[in-house]
Image (cartoon, rainbow, N blue to C red):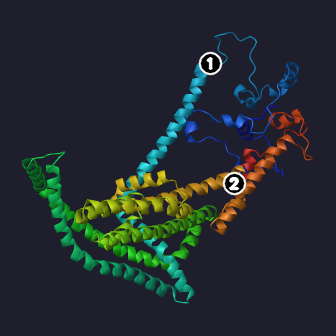
Amino acid sequence: MGRVSSDSKNTNESSGQKKSGGPNSPDPRDVVDGRDFADILMGSGRMDPESSLPLPGEDPAPVKSPAEASRESIFLDGDPAMSHPDEEVGPLQSDENAEPGKELRDRAEVIGTSARWAAGWSLRFLVVAAAFWVLGRALSGVWTGILPVILAIIVCTVLWPVVRLLRKGHLPNALAVLLTIILFFAVIGGIIAAIAPSVSKQIPQLVDRGAEGIEQIQNWVAGPPLNLQSDQIDNMIDQATNWVQDQTDQITQTAITGVSAITSGAITLFVMLVLIFFFLKDGEKFLPMVRRVAGRRVGWHLTEVLTRCWNTLGGFIRTQAIVSFIDAFFIGLGLVIMGVPLAGPLAIITFFGGFIPIVGAFTAGALAVLVALVANGFTTALIVLGIVLAVQQLEGNVLQPVLQSKAMKMHAVIVLLSVTVGGGLFGIIGAFLAVPVAAMITEVFRYIGDLTDLATGEKHSADIAFATSAGQQTGAQREQAAQRWQDWKKSLTTDDSGEPKPFSRFLAPLLPDDKDGKGGKDDKPSDDSASTQS
């Protein structure tokens, strides 16, 4: 006999015939209807054709003779769970009374079923898109308050190992945090102080060489193959000058906005410093508070997810710092060897640009080539371009696969799309934060996938690397629930000795009357028993 589909099981599970407390009864929380709001709104059942198909390795149902079918029809009559021909397993038999051009099933019914399925999934997609739109609007409204929190968390992932090391040296918690913050900003200030003199000396020289480079470009476009006249060149320069003059009001407004942005940046920096101090000092108390507020079950999930996100974010920042340092070192060394001015500042720009994957490295490399072109000429620019490409190939083919794959496990397409969307929505800050945010979202989906694998029995809890003991307990519970479900399914087809049940005994729990002398009782929990156990 073919297997009963999941919809048939759901129909009989919801019929709620009798109470039972058998040892193989599944957890009532595991027995679900399988329909969501879209199915109910569209007036359709769950479309799950895979549940009625044989699994790989199963033998197809044997084709029964008319005599066998007539003997077993007494168990099928009146049972709505067994009355759907599309839920039968086995090869489709041709009807002797079928004629060419005669419909075996109404075409409108088939098309309507598919249309309801498509409409249901379209409705789900619209709801998800609307939720993301509302979330984006809400974030844009409170972005000023969220930005220092996000930046503080990112900085904390960098400083936390230092704080932990100082704590092991028996320093007080607050003192260890304060010393770490002072050391961090001392390093940043030292780097700026080291490059400031060279920048102030070399920028005027770079401007002069840039003017000479512009004259060389004018001479080049005046010759073959362009052969532009001097009047045409002067006309183009005049048009550019007039355009700049026409934009005076906009430039003034931009300057005013820049002053406002500097003030806002100072406030953001101050708030970020305060948050960094308290995050590093009292961050370990956050997860216990989450468990108390959210409850045990939800708190366990949040503890595991947040810990995974923290580990992923810290791994991304540290590995990206290593990759960016290697890029900056070799590109800066090449600029020094070629005598390109501003080699130190360009190396630092390359380092910070490396934290914006793909886009940052490309922008920093293009800037280095442009400076080499203006200052040292076309030949030096080509050599610098070769150095930049060689270093980026080393990063993309060796460093990124080895280091970043362990930290994020994200495809390059996801990284590129994240940077593009983040930069388009929130500018440079959005491009910088796009990959860490995408990595944390990916970690959430990865955790959901792990729980799904445990629920379906595809994995065991020992096969998953949980970050916390709460995650291990949750995984063990999910695995036990899957085992209870498997035992209950097995109890439908085999008896206590492991022998297959007769056909009549297998269908007895599905019948409304007493066929096997048990008074209609079976091992499946009804709705009443499910609510009682819950």
Label 1 near label 2: C-beta < 8 Å?
Answer: no
Say whether residue 306 is visible. Answer: yes
Q: CA distance from mark 2 to mark 1?
A: 41 Å
Q: Quadrant of residue 225?
A: top left
x 44%, y 86%: residue: 179
Left or right? Give the position of 429 relative to 468.
left
Say which quadrant the C terminus sits in: bottom right
Tell me the element at label 2: helix
User: Viewer-nearest of labels 2 and 1?
Assistant: 2
Q: The disc labelled 2 sits on which kind of residue?
A: Leu
337 or 507, nearer to the observer: 337
Say which quadrant the N terminus sits in: top right
Which residue is identified by label 1? 106
373 or 54, nearer to the observer: 373
x 34%, y 76%: residue: 270
Which residue is identified by label 2? 454
